[in-house]
Image: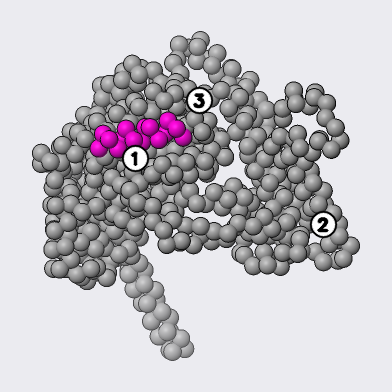
Amino acid sequence: MSLPSLAVSYSQEDWAFVLDDADRYAVTVVFMIGLAICLFVIDEFRGTRPKASAAFMPVFYPDESIPWAKLNDYEYFSGLFGLGIRKWGLWKWATKVVRRSATKATKKSQGEEDEHSYRDMDLPWTTVVHAYIGYMVLFIKGILRECLWTVTFNKNNNASENWCPQWWKEFYTQHMYRRIEDCWNRPICSAPGSTIDILVRSRHDHMAKRFGKFQPTGEVQKGCINLASYNYLGFGGTDEYCTPLAIKALDQYGLAVCASRPEYGGTNRLHNEFEAKVAAFLGKEDALVMGMGFATNSTFLGALAMTECGSLAKRTLFVSDQLNHKSIVEGVKQSSAKVIGFKHNNMHDLEKILDRETRSGKWAKIVILVEGIYSMEGEFCRLRETVSLKNKYKCYLWLDEAHSIGAVGPTGRGVSELFDVDTAEIDIMMGTFTKSFGSNGGYIASTNECIQHLRRCSLGWLHGAAMPPMVTAQAMAALDLLSTERGKAKLRAVRVNANYLREGLMKLNLRVIGDIDSPVICVMLVHPEKIAQFSRECLKRNIAAVVVGYPATPVILSRARFCVSASHTKEQLDATLEAVKEVSKIVGIEYGNNTNESAARAYRTYLSEAPIITNPLPGLETYWNPEPLVPNYTDIERESLSSKRRRALVRADRGASMVRWGSRSTHR
């Protein structure tokens, strides 16, 4: 609100015309609240309670929703606003400042360094407050829309949708996400090369009706610079080497195998050849490939969690980085293992957890789960230090290289090559072909025993459809190219392009995150309204970029993400920087570049030179002796055979006794 304007004297007739936008908006909000209350009271007197959505019910009818009537006042109001607060959570929030000060004082007295690498992510308090106010305004607007949708005469037309039983999730989806749904799921009309053609969509928005579905208009926006696809090496479109081999495989083997890998006809020569090449490329004994990258994590982690003695044995413990991908989260959920998260890239926290859990004696084995490049941060994992802790506490390491394989390293072998870590130090290497290889599916590389176990026990392997032949041929051709001069030139190009764009964005006074040499670069947006505004303004200037918000990121850490490709030219990157410069001024995201370039380069060097510990902690074997990574099937089969023999002898003894008992009874 503009305070000086209120001090000016105006006549009664002119007063309505001097209100600025904020004043008009405030008056409108008050009027809408009054109107909603009036409509609600009228409906109550008429005895026609509306068919309210799950998002609306707790606000006006708590006794008819989830068990709100049985909750006390504290639980009711904490759930009413969808905050998910519990008593201990509220206490921890209230004492957070005191505990943080005490922790810092303890670290300082013990001479410990903070676990921040080189980047201070603290945002100005004014920016954070502004973001929270933005969410508050959206919440109020959502309540007003619910009033119009469920209390007014449109209530019957708006009551046909199936709602999520957790009303606050549905409320967020309807009023935070769907209002800016046009920023995601944009269909394209071309191959995902350095530029793409985007199909234009539209929908009719009405204040008193729910958000409708987007419909194509028939228009196509051509020539948008593609910074949204994970097409790191530029194989996403037509390639002079890969495409003919994919077409040849299509002619020879058909479109699909129509079976899972263990079934008859589910495995062909291409699959066996590809698995051998993947294992040799990564320096592992064996490898397997499957048709879906997401499922490579989500369906194989459950098999890895199995222990030698089954459900009667100690469980497996997964120690997972808190920013790991959703596929890892789902894989852990579907397993029998327990999971403990450690702070992102925080080696002090990881070591503290490993030391505590190895001493507890509760676990059969411990597996550390990390990613090579974290796709929402653009940051590398601290692989050398993670390997040191794995060796120090005799744990196992699962490395997800979905975004790093084929994108970093002199020959594209991922972060293990980039940071000079022997792949023998990494127990399980997982990756996908959906990004750098321009194909589909994923792989796991490990020892022969581990791969055979995963083939026996993984639901994704046993029941998932095998990779189509043309998809396999495309990924194998791209893998072959990495060892050639053309492949090495692509790897150099993606590194140079990524660093060039990263430096250019920092010069625009933007808050940029992402490590040097990473092909993923993020720019902080923070405010909820700026998510859609940034995406739409970029698209107007033919820039296709990804915007990310809650729940993929923390609430006030929404961001834009740029994925750089080897196929991008310098002219395209310069055009991108020019467009982002205009958009950043319009949207207002110039939060200041807080990255010390010399410190960033020193940190990047440290990632490649940190010492690796190979020996376990002295005295560790006295209280920690983990099981093998996968069950020993020789021992299990031997034990199973002996148990079968024992059961057979017991049955034989029972049979003999029954015969004797029967003969005695007959004699009597």
Q: Is residue 350 left or right of residue 388?
A: right
Q: Residues within 10 Å of mark 1 (few under 14, many from 20)?
A: many
Q: Which residues are magenta?
A: 569-583
In the rendered structure, which amino acid carries the disc numbered 3?
A: Tyr
For disc 1, the marked residue is 563
Label 1 to label 2: alpha-carbon separation: 49 Å
In the rendered structure, which amino acid carries the disc numbered 1?
A: Cys
Question: Please, what secondary structure does the residue beneath circle 3 have?
Answer: loop
In the rendered structure, which amino acid carries the disc numbered 2?
A: Phe
Q: Residue at x 40, y 49 (%)?
A: 327
Task: Tell me residue 341's x, y (percent).
Answer: 46, 37
Magenta segment includes 168: no
Q: 525 above or below 221? A: above
Question: Please, what secondary structure does the residue beneath circle 2 have?
Answer: helix
**Residue 250 visible to the viewer:** yes
C-beta proximity under 8 Å, tags 2 and 3: no
Quadrant of the snapshot with the N terminus = top right
Q: Residue at x 18, y 66 (%)?
A: 250
**Residue 453 visible to the viewer:** no
For disc 2, the marked residue is 40
Q: Is residue 289 left or right of residue 316?
A: left
Label 3 to label 1: alpha-carbon separation: 21 Å
